[in-house]
């Protein structure tokens, strides 16, 4: 069996410069995560606020924790306290709650807008139309503690590579359009978070800047 460090090296060899590797640590033990840390990774992703908070307390301080799962309003305060980035922002209302919570805690927080690119009901996010017709310039002008850094999306879970490629391409196009129309003046609007174990190569070919990998680093989740 290959070690976590070997797995990380093998993934990194496939990533061009400018693409960051995030280790998705849901359901992983402290020791497994420390192996990834010792192999040099510093960005870790969790689906649930509670797990993220618990792991953050037990692991080194220089880890940047990203929340990648759906955020309920009653968990916003905890999310803002523990995460450096919330990748799963799926409404303007949530963005405002995050901003208020960050202000109350005197913190800055980075966010990604999650876009629904898959044709599966279960995957959340803004639709392409919604996100492009939202007046982001007005909204961002009123946000005090949130920096919108880009977009996040998940492709349909399918063997149809061409379909997955088209979905990633669409997300990259939405990112570019948002950048041109609304975020030109936003420093650091630079992140397209797309690609997981099964599809990260396609995501990278279509312009991903951040891949979120669990299984390929740590093995199958039990
Ligand atoms: C679990 C998860 C991943 C990683 O999935 P793997 O297939 O294990 O690489 C990436 N993104 C999100 C949003 C996830 O929930």
Image (spheres, rainbow, N blue to C red):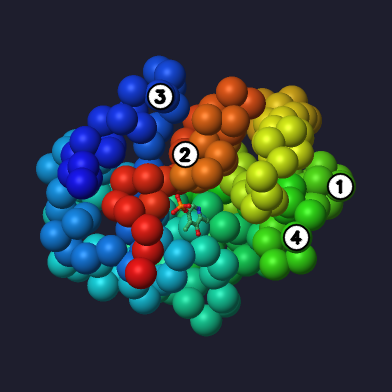
Reading the image, the residue beneath label 1 is 129
Compared with 177, 215 (above or below) is below
**Can residue 144 be seen?**
no
Depth check: 222 or 184 in front? 222
Residue positioned most to the bottom: 74
Which residue does the image show at 59% across and 46% down from the upper left?
152
Reading the image, the residue beneath label 3 is 14
Q: Quadrant of the C terminus?
A: bottom left
Reading the image, the residue beneath label 4 is 120
Q: Position of residue 36 (x, y in %)?
A: 21, 46
Nearest to the eye among marks 1 and 4: give it. Answer: 4
CB-based contact (under 8 Å), mark 1 and mark 3: no
Residue positioned most to the top: 17
Say which label, 1 or 4, has the lower sequence index: 4
* Kind of element beneath mark 2: strand
Depth check: 15 or 78 in front? 15
Say which label, 1 or 2, has the lower sequence index: 1
Nearest to the eye among marks 1 and 3: give it. Answer: 3
Say which label, 2 or 4, has the lower sequence index: 4
Q: Position of residue 138 (x, y in %)?
A: 74, 46
Distance Cα–Cα, label 1 vs label 4 = 17 Å
Reading the image, the residue beneath label 2 is 211
CB-based contact (under 8 Å), mark 3 and mark 4: no
**Can residue 219 be seen?**
yes
Label 4 C-beta lies within 8 Å of the nearest ligand 1 atom: no
* Kind of element beneath mark 4: loop
Depth check: 30 or 102 in front? 30
Q: Residues within 10 Å of mark 3 (few under 14, many from 20)?
A: few
């Amino acid at each position: 069996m290959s070690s976590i460090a070997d797995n990380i090296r093998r993934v990194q060899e496939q990533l061009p410069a400018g693409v960051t590797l995030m280790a998705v640590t849901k359901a992983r033990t402290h020791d497994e995560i420390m192996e990834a840390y010792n192999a040099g990774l510093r960005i870790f992703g969790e689906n649930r606020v509670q797990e993220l908070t618990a792991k953050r307390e037990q692991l080194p301080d220089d880890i940047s924790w990203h929340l990648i799962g759906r955020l309920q309003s009653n968990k916003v305060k905890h999310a803002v306290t523990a995460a450096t980035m919330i990748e799963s922002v799926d409404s303007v209302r949530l963005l405002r709650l995050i901003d208020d919570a960050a202000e109350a805690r005197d913190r800055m927080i980075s966010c990604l807008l999650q876009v629904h690119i898959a044709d599966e009901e279960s995957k959340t996010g803004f639709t392409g139309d919604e996100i492009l017709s939202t007046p982001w310039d007005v909204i961002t002008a009123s946000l005090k503690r949130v920096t919108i850094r880009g977009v996040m999306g998940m492709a349909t879970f399918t063997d149809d590579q061409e379909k997955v490629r088209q979905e990633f391409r669409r997300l990259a196009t939405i990112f570019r359009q948002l950048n041109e129309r609304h975020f030109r003046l936003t420093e650091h609007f630079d992140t397209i978070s797309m690609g997981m174990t099964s599809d990260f190569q396609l995501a990278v070919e279509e312009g991903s800047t951040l891949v979120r990998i669990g299984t390929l680093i740590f093995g199958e989740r039990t």
